[in-house]
Each structure stands twice: as C-alpha cells, then as structure tokens.
Amino acid sequence: MPRPRMFDETAVLDAAAREFREHGFAETSTDQLCEAAGMGRSSLYNAFTSKDELFVRALERYVATTGSRQESILADDALRGAERLRGLIDVVVDEELQASKRGHAAGCMVVQSFMSPDLRERDDRVARILERDLRARLSLLSGAIRAGQIDGSIIEGIDPDEGAVLVSTVISGLRVTAQTGVDADMLHRIALVGMSAVLS
C-alpha cells in the first residue's frame, strides 16, 4: 500500500508558481523550487516527476487562480465597465507594490511563458493552457468593455474585442516594466495613459 503524501500539493504548486512567475522557467533552479516548497529534491521529483511536470501543474493552478480573481472583478455587475478595468489595474499594481517591498517584481507566469516560446514548443500542454487562458481573459475584458459602453463609462466607438487586446497588452507591459524597478505610482499612471483610448 502506498504511503499517503505528507505535503500540501496546492501549497507546493503555489510556491512553485511564485518562483516561476518571478524568474521564468529557465532561471528557476530545482534548489529554488525545493526551498520555496519546503521539500527535498527526491520528494519533489517523486511527487511531480520533473521540473517540466511541476511547471505545467503550477501553470494550470496559476491560471485557474488568477482567472477566478479576474472574473470576480471583470464580471461584477455592480460595477460600471470602466470601474472593472480600473479595478483590474489596481490589483496588478498592488501586487507589484507588495512585491517591491520584498525586493523584487511580482512578475506573471503567463507573461513569462509567452516570452519563452521554447516552453510551448517542448510541451504542447503549455501552449494549450496559455491559449485557453488568453481566450478566457479577452472574453472577460471584452464583456467589461461592452458593459461600459452601455453604461457610458467606456467609449462607444471602440471595438470591444480590440479594446480587450489593448487592455491585455497594457497589463502585460506593466508586468514587464515592473521588472525594471519602476515604482507602483508610475505603473498606475502608465496604465491609465495606456487605457485612455478606451475610457470615456
């Protein structure tokens, strides 16, 4: 009879995602993952087989968690469309602010993965997860923009799908820019300028 696992799998995946989102796949060592997860190397590999497998599992967990958080903001019917977009920006900027207090940028596992095309080539599961996440995120953003056009808080002339791509691009840009050490106040100003083509 196999022995029961003596670790919290969700906590390990979240810890691994924090390392991958900050450093990327290639720059995250097994030692870093073991330290973050509080596990020995053999235990980590017994549980997840390889660094690649841990990455895929952590990415699945990461997009599910972030997607749920984004949906809670972007699909909130109590908020005007523009408030939903600003709320999402506020979450991103606050994450970067909190991370900067710990001496680094928060990063984003999705952005890191898109910037490493070899990851998608070596494991098609990564490509499928990223594509599914992008479709879901753009759909939520497009819906928020449509809601804003109805309530008057977002410009009527912009195509909601194009606006969704614009907002997604601004947020990805914020994640990359934060890696250079730009402070949260400037990130917030950059975001509002970037979204000025959408907001009324």
Image (cartoon, helix red, strand yellow):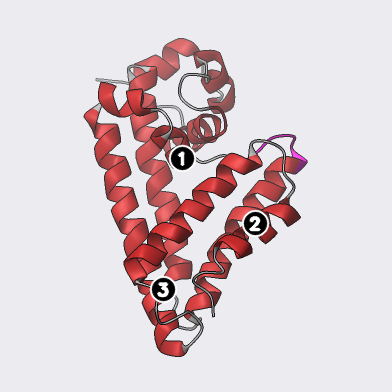
Q: Earlier in the sequence, mark 3 or mark 1?
A: 1
Q: Earlier in the sequence, mark 2 or mark 3?
A: 3
x, y percentage for residue 96? 65, 47
Q: Is residue 70 visible?
A: yes
Q: CA distance from mark 3 to mark 1?
A: 22 Å
* Disc nearest the viewer among 2 and 3: 2
Residue behind mark 3: 144
Q: 162 or 97, which lies in front? A: 162
Q: CA distance from mark 2 to mark 3?
A: 20 Å
Q: Amino acid at mark 1?
A: Val
Residue behind mark 2: 190
Q: Is residue 4 visible?
A: no
Q: Secondary structure at mark 3?
A: helix
Q: Is residue 103 left or right of residue 139?
A: right
Q: Are marks 3 and 1 in contact (CB under 8 Å)?
A: no
Residue, x 48% and y 79% (percent of image)? 154
Which of the 4 image quarters holds residue 45?
top left
Dot 3 alpha-carbon crowd within 10 angstroms: few under 14, some 14 to 19, many 20 or more: many
x, y percentage for residue 115? 43, 32
Q: 177 or 43, which lies in front? A: 177
Q: Which mark is residue 141?
A: none
Q: Secondary structure at mark 1?
A: helix
Q: Is residue 179 left or right of residue 197?
A: right
Q: CA distance from mark 2 to mark 1?
A: 18 Å
In the current view of this chain or complex, which residue is farthest to the top?
42
Q: Which residues are magenta?
A: 101-105
Q: Amino acid at mark 3?
A: Ala
Which quadrant holds the C terminus? bottom right
x, y percentage for residue 172? 50, 47
Residue behind mark 1: 111
Q: Amino acid at mark 2?
A: Ile
Q: Is residue 156 magenta?
A: no
